[in-house]
Amino acid sequence: MSFLSFLRFKIQTYTSLPYVSLLRYQRRIANNNDFVILCYHRVRERTGIFYDNNISASSLEFRKQMLYINKHFNVISIDQLTEHSKGNSKLKPNSIMITFDDGYKDNAINAFPVLEELCMSAVVFVTTGYIDSDSIPWEDQVSYLFSKISAKKVEIEDKRVYPLETQDQKEKSIWHFCKKLNLFTPVKRNEVIRGLYDKYQIDEEEMHKAAHGISMGYMSRKDIRYWDDHGIVYGIHTVTHPCLTTLTEEKMYSEISESKRALEDILGKPVNAFAYPYGRKGDFNNATTQIVKNVGLRICMICEPGTNHLDCNYLGLKRISMDGDTNFELACHGILNFFDLFKEIRKLIELRRK
Ligand SMILES: [Zn+2]
């Protein structure tokens, strides 16, 4: 465990209401207009065999989180954010935005009804090439395969070895293997996965049986239209979810513009928001930003963690990923580690002195 991870672990362990109450108080008295954007992926129960790494919350955890946000924060919409970006309005202190990436079916089943019940808005960035797909996503297939392979390691053509002897090794190997497959074209990726079924004699039918009852796939056109009428706002997330910077400019352009056109066709109205797939430094560059501007997108989100200020870059809005390691309550305040917390508490002390 690195020193920073250790500090992060400690802060999560000792996080308690006093810190969070202090932060709320600080924001209120400082009239702090920074806003936080949370990024969710899947909202479903953990399975232990499929790709649980992108589960942001279980249904129950999500409900609790939304009740907390509803009680303590001002949930902002894309329209409010757009007006704010033009300088036409000011956001209230403790503003927060809820976003979902990829357009998973489980969002429509487990998350949106909660948002509707609490009258909260959210933005969903849809990978348009996956709309209507109810097949098992490739990451889930990799996880299933790795959980069933009895060999001590998996090796693919680049000779890289993925050890599977312990649970920890399995989890790391799944993560590295998926990262590797991300760089392949969809055809090549399917070939590699198909090769694993054959080589290790894993029964695909058994996998489908194991997935029965779990919302594995993506939202349908019908889901998208239904939730468009019930408080959900949509943005695009490309057609096939590539790392854009690995593509030629021509291909980058088609991934973004085709995705926009497809979603606008479904919704019958313009789409102005975009989230970069993966969204970390290296997953976007000057060329991607220029294309985003050229196709008329006005609000773009990345996954670099942090809060956003009034004069921030609206084509690179930071978001906090809700993953297994994220402390939800601190994340809502934009606090990701011990240093952030220390800075906020110091600001509070300075404010009290004035
Ligand atoms: Zn994504």
Image: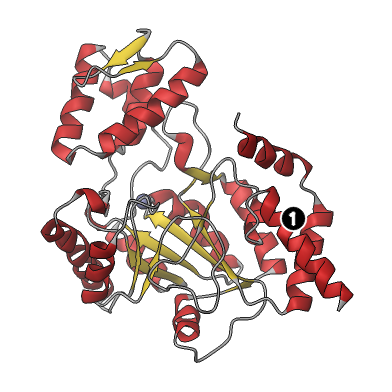
Locate residue 42 relative to residue 26 in the image: left or right: left
Residue appearing at x 68%, y 52% in the figure: 339
Q: Position of residue 254 (x, y in %)?
A: 15, 61
Disc 1 C-beta below 8 A from ligand 1? no
Residue 39 is situated, as x and y percent measured from the top left of the image, at 49, 56
Residue located farthest toward the bottom when viewing the structure as drawn: 88
Q: Is residue 45 above or below residue 254?
A: above
**233 sits left or right of 195 in the view:** right
For label 1, the residue is 342
Is 153 positioned to the left or the right of 32 in the image?
A: left
In the shown orientation, is residue 224 left or right of residue 157? right
Percent coordinates x, y for residue 76 in the rendering: 55, 75
Percent from the top left, x then y, of residue 1?
A: 60, 28
Depth check, front residue: 134 or 254: 254
Q: Quadrant of residue 90?
A: bottom right
Q: Residues within 10 Å of mark 1 (few under 14, many from 20)?
A: few
In this rendering, the answer to whether 242 lies above or below 256 is above
Residue 209 appears in the figure: no
Specify the amino acid type for callout 1. Phe
Q: Residue at x 44, y 55 (%)?
A: 303
Q: Nearer the viewer, residue 190 or 91?
A: 91
